[in-house]
Amino acid sequence: MIRRIVLSAGALALVAGSAAVVATATPPPVDSPAPMSFEIEPPTPVVACPGAQTVPVGDVGTAGDLASEPTVRTLDVRGSTATRVLGFGLAADDAIAVQTEQIADGDIEGWAALTCAQPSFDQWLVGGATTLGSSARLVLLNPSAAPTEVTVTIYGPLGAQQDQLLLPVAPGDSVQRLIEAVATQMSALVVRVEATGPGIVAALQDSRLAGFQPAGTAWVGASAPATDLAIPLVNADAQAVPRGDTGGVQVIDPGTATTVTDAASPTVDVPPPTVTVRLMAPEGANVDLSLVSSAGIESWSVGQPLALEPGVVTDIDVPTDTLGAVEVRSDAPVLAAARTVVARAPREGLADDVAYDHTWVPAMDVRASTTLSAVVPLDGARLAVYSPYSARVDVLDDADQVVGSAEVTGRTVQWVPMSATAGTRVRIAGVFAWAFVMTSPDGYIASVAPVDISDSVLTATVRPGMYPNSVSG
């Protein structure tokens, strides 16, 4: 009995010793490494321009009384680097550039200009129509070395269309679509463009006819929704002269002015410019509009806040006969842009015919200070600046030299004198909305809006974790 007890105690001691050995052999838990963060420099910027405008449909050639294709045009892209062909358009290894085009005949006669932008993942194009005599040509450009897929959503007076466009765009290529082919008889358009991968550069060609006469051609650039916006340029004092008083249609080549053709028809009175503001709230909003001029707030109002239904595009006529800006304040993000239409004497036609040109200016966020940049499009282009507060505006070039300045009274829009020549990159910092405008005595008009080209360094954080489907130990 005593021996059994001793043996049992020895066995227990052996088991306990084995357990101790096993416990000693188990490795201690490893401390998890701390997350590591590092900065990623932004890639070398690249911009894309949509290139030459095209006659959308019904081309009947360049000869005869009803010829639609332009025979006289100038297309110029200004930036700090050379351009290369990118499908329908052009690309440049640059942070920003500007495209200007002047067409002297045909169905798309007129002036058009646009800031050539960098690719983006989500952008809104506020402008265009697909009613009779109108064409909206969407141009998508991919200047990167990777493919992208683009989703296009079309909004109109009845809201968003159910069917979306899904368009792949190959690296270094472009794609175009006529919006009227998928959304007919829309008097007011807003187009949303969302892209995967490296993003996309999007622009909309808005061309119109009034009977057999050209009624304006313009590029619509990207916008962004916000709750406190300003459209810095409406009307722009663009006053066309009667036919027969100018001696011809003037097309400006960089640094020169050339008369292309003489107006042979009798003098005809042309109507004054008209201005329309286009609004759309993706989720709906209540919107207040105010009109200001160089003298301050003008006595114009729609009477009460506008209740915008989600996705419904609304046009509002603005009665103004001088340079103005439109303030847009809302309780939810809203998109806005203004279209100025200038009547002019046509090159040919019946005695009472009138031709037109037009331009779109997007609304800009004026909630906080930003730095916006643009390239001076042409010599003689004028700069209009709006400020919600009284402030001094300084226009700087790439050498940080002041090339223009002015004191701007709060809630006014002013012409700011500037010494910078065509092709100069300029920037303005502060709470301002601004744009360049080009007009001619013959009734042509075009505008260029600035964009934000500030580089933002990305910060990446690596956190430790298990690989998918891995087993610990």
Image: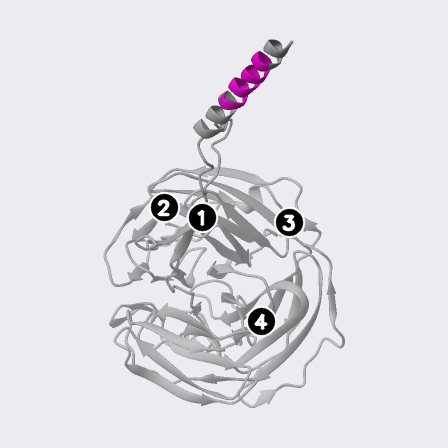
Magenta residues, start to end: 6-17
The circle on residue 229 is 4
**How many neighbours does mark 2 have within 10 angstroms: few (below 14), some (14-19), or many (20 or more)?**
some
Identify residue type, mark 1.
Answer: Val
Say which quarter of the image contains residue 293.
bottom right
Which is nearer the N-term, disc 2 or disc 4?
2
**How many neighbours does mark 4 have within 10 angstroms: few (below 14), some (14-19), or many (20 or more)?**
many
CA gap between label 3 and label 4 equals 29 Å
Mark 2 and mark 3 in contact? Answer it, CB < 8 Å.
Answer: no
Q: Is residue 245 visible?
A: no
Identify residue type, mark 2.
Answer: Phe
Mark 3 and mark 4 in contact? Answer it, CB < 8 Å.
Answer: no
- The quarter of the rendered structure image containing the N terminus is top right
Numbered disc in front, either 2 or 4: 4
281 up-or-down from 252: above or below? above
Find disc 1 in the rendering and name its residue. Answer: 139
Left or right: where 417 falls relative to 132: left
CA gap between label 2 and label 4 equals 33 Å
Left or right: where 1 falls relative to 262: right
Numbered disc in front, either 1 or 4: 4
**How many neighbours does mark 3 have within 10 angstroms: few (below 14), some (14-19), or many (20 or more)?**
few
State the image coordinates of residue 16 (x, y, percent, origin top left): 54, 23
Q: Residue at x 35, y 84 (%)?
A: 404
Find disc 2 in the rendering and name its residue. Answer: 88
Main SS type for the magenta part?
helix
**How many neighbours does mark 1 have within 10 angstroms: few (below 14), some (14-19), or many (20 or more)?**
many
Find disc 3 in the rendering and name its residue. Answer: 185
Front residue of 413/206: it is 413
CA gap between label 1 and label 3 equals 20 Å
Which is nearer the N-term, disc 3 or disc 4?
3
State the image coordinates of residue 40 (x, y, percent, origin top left): 35, 53
Identify residue type, mark 3.
Answer: Gln
